[in-house]
Image: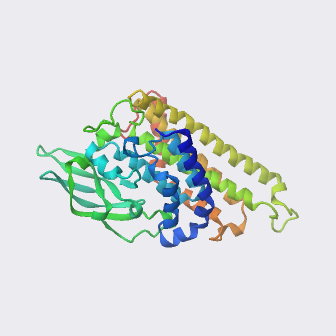
Amino acid sequence: MATQEELTSVLDAVRDAVPTLRRNGVEAEDRRMIPDENIALLEKAGVFRAAVPRAHGGLDLDVAQQARIIAEVSRGCPSTGWLTMVWLTSTWAASLYPDRAQQEVFEGGSTRVSIVFAPTGTLTPADGGYRLDGTWRFNSGVRGAGWDMLAAMVEHPDGTSEELVALVPTSELSLADDWHVSAGAGTGSSTATATGVFVPAHRVVPLEEAMVSATGDRANTGATGRNYGLLGYIMSSVAATFLGMAQGAYELFVERLPGRAITYTDWTEQSLHPLTQQKVATAANKIDAARALSAGWQRVLQDAADAGEQPTDEQKAVIRGQTAFAAQLSKEAVELLFAASGGSVIRRDVPLQRFHRDIQGFSLHALVQLEANLEVQGRVLLGMDPGTYFL
């Protein structure tokens, strides 16, 4: 586990990189993938060691520490923050694979892994493993990752089927140049295709086992403090991305205020108008409320992992609702600030518009859908079952 000095070193380096990440926003959108400079800065900062186990040279940060890093990156660039979230959570998920696979993935102590949960592929048993075929869309960050985790279905001899997750080097996949979008444009979420790719058995795990950190053939089982509930851990990191985007938008809004008038009025300083003051206060409170909520679910996840247990289904349902609610609060804060920014905010060289577009787009992700997640939470609050196994 990382020392406080190691964590501080990473956070300080990321803060120093924030101006560059913001400045590179236009380039990220133009090339439809974050610039190599962004990746190099985060690599140098140690970000991609954050979720790698200590045994493999990583920092082995806990869920709350990873969230701080993700939020800090997102404060600089939403797309870079989103990819950081994907790469860290997927790297952690790779720690659920057998020791042999971990050795392959974590060699060197720093790695980037992508993931797609939709089981849009098939696995066919073969000698020593499986043959993987399929196509996976919205594969965020695959262009900058060394490995990809791809969900696929396998049919057993008795006629039953099972969802497995295959860990594949990205060099063995075909990547389409098809990421043309209006939000999250810098995430390089291209479509990946596998055609008869051989995946050895040690690089395939059942999704059902991975969801509760119950996979075998690995030394890091039990009360290591890192065997989190998979979905809750990922949702926590997603919420951190939204929180960082909102904080970045808040800072950008305040930076633009000095000397700004309200056009076609007698107000020569926008900051002196009570409505502006109210909007800034409301946005700040929404961000702080989201941050306060995060401390609660991070504690639930960590306490369970420290005890070598999983959160209860009820706790997991609440985490789903609270993380989505925090993301909504963050989105609302950005919307408030964007609406108060005047017509010039739509210029591409004004970063705030990118934060607004990106947080709108990311909020459409299936994991962040507010109503669906609140329904799951509301069911358990009313004494019912969660209504889904995806917890």
Residue 248: % across, % down: 63, 55
Picture quarter with the C terminus: top left
Residue 185 shows in the view:
no
Looking at the image, residue 102 sits to the left or right of residue 129; the answer is right
Looking at the image, residue 195 sits to the left or right of residue 266; the answer is left
Residue 126: % across, % down: 13, 54
Q: Residue at x 45, y 35 (%)?
A: 317
Q: How is the image coloured?
A: rainbow
Q: Is residue 315 placed above or below 95 in the rendered structure?
A: above
Residue 103: % across, % down: 30, 48
Q: Is residue 82 placed above or below 375 in the rendered structure?
A: below
Task: Report which quarter residue 60 is drawn in.
Answer: top left
Residue 233 shows in the view:
yes
Q: Residue at x 56, y 36 (%)?
A: 295
* In-front residue for pair 173/18: 18
Residue 176: % across, % down: 35, 70
